[in-house]
Structures are given as C-alpha cells and as structure tokens.
C-alpha cells in the first residue's frame, strides 16, 4: 500500500466534517477525500438494509479513487460494523469511537446521556459498550430527530433549533445525566447551544478526537502515516454544493479545500 494515497472519509451528509477537522489536526500531512451523501441524507431514520446499500456505493466509489484507509465519520454508519462497511474491499476501516473511556473518566454519578439518531439509539451499541466497561453505569438515549434537518439547512440560532435543543436536553436533565455523548457527527455544529442548555454542571463529549487518534494509530502501525509534505482535502457531495460549502466553512478553512459534486 502506497502511503501517498488519500484517506477516505464518509458520512451521510455534512456532519462528518466535524470529524474531518479532528483528522486534519491529528494528521496535518495527509490527503483526505471526503464523501458526503447529501442527496440522500439523513440516514438516521432509514433501515439497516438501505444504509448498508448506500454505504456499499460510497465505498465502491472510494475504492476506485485508491484510498489507503476509510474513516466512517458517522455514528449511524458505524453501528453497521467495520466488516459490513468494508465489504469486499481491502482497506482498513475506522469507525466512530463511542468515547467510552472519556465518558467514564468524566462522569461522577455514572448517569450518562446519549444524544443520537433514531437508528443509533435503537441499536443500544453505546449502552452495551459503556456497561461492558462499567456495569454500574446507566445510559439514557434520546433520539434527536429534529437536529439533522435543522443543521443541514443551516438554521443555526433559529427559534426552531433552540426549541429542539431545550426539548432534548430536558429529557436527559430529568435523568440527572452529568455527562452527555454527542452520538451524531452533526451535533458538534450546535455544541455551543447544547452546552448552554445543559449548563456548566454537565460535560459534553465529542468522540471525534478519539476517532482521529484511532485512525492515526492504525496508519502508524501499518507504516502508512505521512510525516511530511502539505496536506490536502477534497470535499465531495452528492447533493447541494452551496449548502455543503456554507456548512464546511463552520468547521474548516474553505481556502484549503477543493469542493466537487459527484454521482454515485
């Protein structure tokens, strides 16, 4: 495998840009190829079979581009499992970290909230992993179905967004959660509002940094990590390019990125 190949990053839409930011920070010399399936987002309310089919189309496209690693920058995709995401391809797959170590270090009362999509909450994957590490921990999931449409239409600071944030935060506040996982990569776009709704007594965990660390460690293990040269980022969307660019500007330096619209 040639270390000069790019790292592929997939997401159902634009949320994975928050993970791409963490990846670029951890590996500044790497080339990244981001593919956001904005034409068919969101994935969170779709069936497992449909999501699996969409992911196969994305991984086939990235295989043709010659990637050396794939990062599934989407919790909904990650819960399919890395073997399902990889399919018949040979490149290694890094799924989203669930932030278990960070969560258990942060919580004091062992009451943990999870803000995620319907699909991610329904799998119980976060609860299982956390309780495997600490059986005394309680995990409360809330399906934040209103977030992705509001974020992907750039309704930041709108009354509708604030109403949704308060609605979902209240569910977890009633459970006395002192630590909350952002279980969808879109949610860091509204992290400021979420933190304000919970107040200073609640720790918000974004697993993107832990995910970037896993990706870097895997490349180091295989001798494929780039340690010199200028990094680059190509950002591809299957849908609205202008919306994608506006949202990317909230997470990345648009001048350091090249944007393209693609068909799967």
Image (spheres, rainbow, N blue to C red):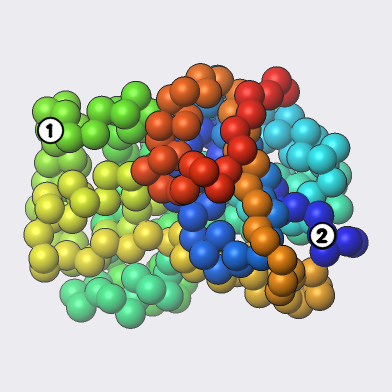
Circle 2 sits on which residue? 4
Q: Nearer the viewer, mark 2 or mark 1?
A: 2
Element type at mark 1:
helix
Residue 138 percent location from the top left of the image:
28, 65
Foreground of the two, 253 or 261: 253
Residue at (81, 75) in percent of width and height: 223
The reply to whether residue 183 is in sight is yes
Residue 67 sits above or below residue 40 on the image: below
Residue 76 percent location from the top left of the image:
51, 42
Residue 148 percent location from the top left of the image:
36, 32
Element type at mark 2:
loop
Q: Is residue 86 left or right of residue 137?
A: right
Q: Is residue 131 left or right of residue 13?
A: left
Circle 1 sits on which residue? 163
Residue 204 sits above or below residue 190 on the image: below
Residue 210 percent location from the top left of the image:
49, 68
């Amino acid at each position: 495998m040639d270390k000069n190949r790019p790292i592929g990053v997939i997401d159902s839409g634009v949320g994975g840009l928050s993970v791409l930011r963490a990846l670029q920070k951890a590996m500044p010399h790497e080339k990244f190829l981001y593919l956001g399936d904005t034409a068919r987002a969101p994935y969170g309310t779709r069936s497992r079979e449909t999501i699996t089919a969409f992911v196969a189309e994305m991984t086939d496209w990235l295989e043709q581009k010659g990637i050396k690693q794939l990062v599934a920058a989407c919790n909904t995709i990650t819960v399919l499992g890395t073997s399902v995401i990889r399919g018949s391809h040979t490149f290694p797959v890094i799924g989203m970290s669930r932030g278990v170590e960070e969560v258990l270090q942060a919580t004091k009362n062992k009451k943990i909230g999870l803000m995620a999509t319907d699909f991610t909450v329904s799998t119980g994957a976060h609860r299982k992993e956390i309780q495997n590490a600490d059986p005394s921990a309680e995990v409360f999931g809330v399906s934040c179905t209103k977030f992705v449409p509001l974020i992907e239409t750039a309704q930041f600071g709108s009354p509708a967004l604030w109403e949704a944030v308060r609605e979902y935060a209240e569910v977890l506040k009633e459970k006395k959660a002192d630590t909350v996982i952002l279980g969808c990569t879109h949610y860091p776009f509204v992290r400021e509002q979420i933190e304000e709704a919970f107040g200073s007594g609640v720790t918000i965990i974004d697993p993107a940094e832990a995910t970037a660390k896993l990706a870097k460690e895997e490349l180091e293990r295989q001798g494929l990590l780039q340690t010199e040269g200028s990094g680059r980022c190509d950002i591809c969307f299957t849908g609205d390019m202008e919306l994608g660019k506006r949202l990317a500007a909230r997470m990345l330096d648009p001048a350091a990125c090249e944007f393209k619209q693609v068909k799967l």
